Amino acid sequence: MGRFSDEMLTVAIDFDGTITESAEYSTDMELILRPGMDILIQWLHARGVDIILWTSRTEGEKLNIAKNFLKDKGLLHCFCSFNTPNSKVEFQTSQKVYADLYIDDLALGFHLITEKGLDISRAVLTALQQDKFLKSNCYNNNPLLDFEMYLNDTQNTTSLRS
């Protein structure tokens, strides 16, 4: 991966259609969390990854709806930034949100992964398997194994609460 630094990892995650199941972003629509995204976000955050909410909901009521949704799901604290105009990094002639990895339902491959019933978490972890920062923050320097252990711990904790 082409990176500015091996000392940190930044992941930008789209909201509508990626964190939530619907790609629409009206203010009156019920939002549904995409299965497994909460666990992936929590795991990345627990491993020290900077997570940016990468969304076209840039201000006002629509952005507040997204933030409140994340807060209700216990995920808002996982995000270090939102792609407001102040969080963009200027690259010569354009402004972009900088990240090492972008997770977006409009990206090549996203629908191939989800339509085949494959787990988006494992696809992301496969892409990051050799990342030096992530490996150094994972059990046995193995993000896939570390995620499986985290997932098992999460499921065990959930079943104990039931």
Image (spheres, helix red, strand yellow):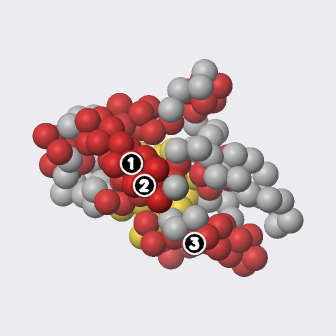
Quarter of the image for the N terminus: give it: top left
Circle 3: residue type? Lys
Residue at x 60%, y 51% (from the top left corner): 19
Is 28 located above or below residue 105 in the figure?
Answer: below
Task: State how far apart marks 2 and 1 are (Cα).
Answer: 6 Å
Residue at x 42%, y 33% (from the top left corner): 122
Q: Which mark is residue 156?
A: 1
Q: Are marks 2 and 1 in contact (CB under 8 Å)?
A: yes
Picture coordinates of residue 150, whole percent (x, y) = 32, 47
Q: Are marks 3 and 2 in contact (CB under 8 Å)?
A: no
Circle 1: residue type? Asn
Q: Is residue 29 left or right of residue 119?
A: right
Label 2: how many residues lie within 10 Å, few (<14), some (14-19) or many (20+)?
Answer: few
- Residue 128: quarter of image: top left
Picture coordinates of residue 123, whole percent (x, y) = 44, 32
Residue at x 34%, y 49% (from the top left corner): 153
Task: State how far apart marks 3 and 1 are (Cα).
Answer: 23 Å
Label 3: how many residues lie within 10 Å, few (<14), some (14-19) or many (20+)?
Answer: few
Picture coordinates of residue 88, whole percent (x, y) = 48, 66
- Which residue was labeled with disc 2? 160
Point out the tag, 3 or 2, that comes first from the N-terminus.
3
Picture coordinates of residue 61, whole percent (x, y) = 75, 76
Total count of labels: 3
> Mark 1 falls on what kind of element?
helix
- Which residue was labeled with disc 3? 71
Circle 2: residue type? Leu
